[in-house]
Amino acid sequence: MRTTVGIIGAGPAGLLLARLLHNAGIASVVLESRDRAYVEQRQRAGILEQGTVDVLREAGVGARMDREGLPHDGIELRFDRRRHRVDFPALTGGKQVMVYAQTEVCKDLIAAQLADGGPLLFEAEALAVEGAETDTPRVRFRHQGREDVLECDYVVGCDGFWGVARKAVPQDLSRTYERTYPFGWLGILADVAPSHDELVYARSDRGFALLSMRSPTVTRAYLQVPDGTNADDWSDEEIWDELDRRLEVDDPAWRLARGPITQKSVTPMRSYVHEPMRHGRLFLAGDAAHIVPPTGAKGLNLAVGDVVTFARALVAYTRKGDADLLDAYSATCLRRVWQAERFSYAMTTMLHRAPDATDFDDRIQRATLDRVTTSTAAETDLAEAYTGFPL
Ligand code: FAD
Ligand code: DHB
């Protein structure tokens, strides 16, 4: 099999890239190791930055998002039994975010690709990328029990943190930066209307809690839990009780609505960057190149930024023979990536309680929250980063 761009992985990065290339008249083939149902059901991110929303609309896959997504103008920070609203449009010159689940973004992109795009092969596992330094890179893969080779002009590794693409960059040319956190998130989905009309990020002495949503009738929520926690260690009642305690606030009008929990899982927390994001004709995009802890919802949005950068660069090269943007791909992406790493790290450390936290750490957290909620400059910094940097 032969194509212009071989894309490994049908997560948001790979699927959106295939759509952007299709719209620009550039052929691609997507290889995805899992089946379609798995990709469409995998619960992950839920917040789209303004720039991501704009990209999906321009790519022609924004119709259902615009009908069913929930535009949000702010978030609430909760600490010391107090609540503070961060008003995004007022602080950023009109920016919003959109609550629209990653599962739905993927469903929309898959439907569009299968309707009129290039091949999208499910249960097609990439085994290795070969010849990245040559003009004819290849992806060896296994599909329907057979091994095959996809010959390409370019390969884009959109295969997530555990994929194979990154391994094709020689070790002596790679540099990685990593931080793990001694806690994770227990995430739930529940059939109950969200208790607040915006997301609530809560810092408490018992640890972090986040109240989010997926629709007007479905609540999404997260609890900071110790490393190694098994989701089944927590009963539904324990989860609601703990959310109640961590979200406590001096406001008689506040009440956490409970309902049947339909899904629960634990996500570990990690910061990770692989540099560079390009080796020869192999480009890395999304979680294949970098991971952020989820606080601040940057992972999916970063993946979108990478593939938009790649698609623009390839279009400039194909149409005008101008290779500058392709040559700048890694540096362009990494600048944004490190801003998101900085923000996600800052949000995580401001709101979570480390198991070895000292009284000093505790006071610094409170001082940071005090600063963010009393200085317009500090609050604007948070709002700008949360709603996203320009693509
Ligand atoms: P992925 O979505 O990981 O997609 C990679 C795809 O490649 C997958 O479909 C995988 O099956 C496929 N693949 C892997 N190896 C191969 C191979 N060898 N051959 C072929 N295909 C392969 N972000 C947030 O902002 N908020 C959250 O709440 C949040 N929760 C998360 C929970 C979990 C458990 C994880 C892992 C991530 C979470 N994230 C969250 C991060 C966000 O979901 C990711 O940043 C986003 O999915 C990145 O998209 P991607 O396309 O780069 O990678
Ligand atoms: C969600 C996830 C996040 O990481 C976040 O910061 C906000 C919301 C969510 O899944 O709804």
Image (cartoon, rainbow, N blue to C red):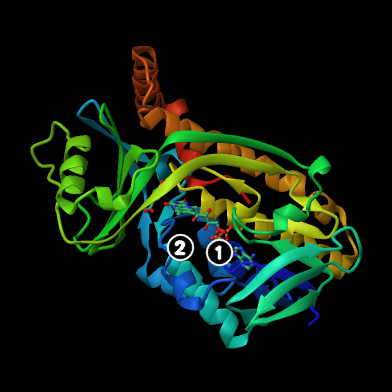
Rendering coords of residue 140 (x, y %): 76, 71
Closest to the observer, 278 or 33: 33
Work out whether 119 lies above or below 139: below
Dot 1 falls on a residue whose secondary structure is helix
Q: Is the shortest distance between ligand 1 and the CB of mark 1 under 8 Å? A: yes
The amino acid marked with disc number 1 is Pro
Q: Is residue 32 above or below residue 45?
A: below
Q: State the CA–CA distance, disc 1 to disc 2.
A: 7 Å
Q: How would you rate the neighbour count of disc 2 (Cα within 10 Å): few for under 14, some for 14-19, many for 20 or more?
A: many
Quarter of the rendering containing residue 91: top left
Residue 1 appears left or right of 67: right
Residue at point 60%, 41% (across, down): 272
Which of the numbered marks, if any, corresponds to residue 102?
Answer: 2
Question: On the image, which quarter does residue 148 sit in?
Answer: bottom right
| Disc sitting over residue 12 in the figure | 1
The residue lying at 49 percent from left, 75 percent from top is 108
Do the residues under discs 1 and 2 have CB atoms within 8 angstroms?
yes
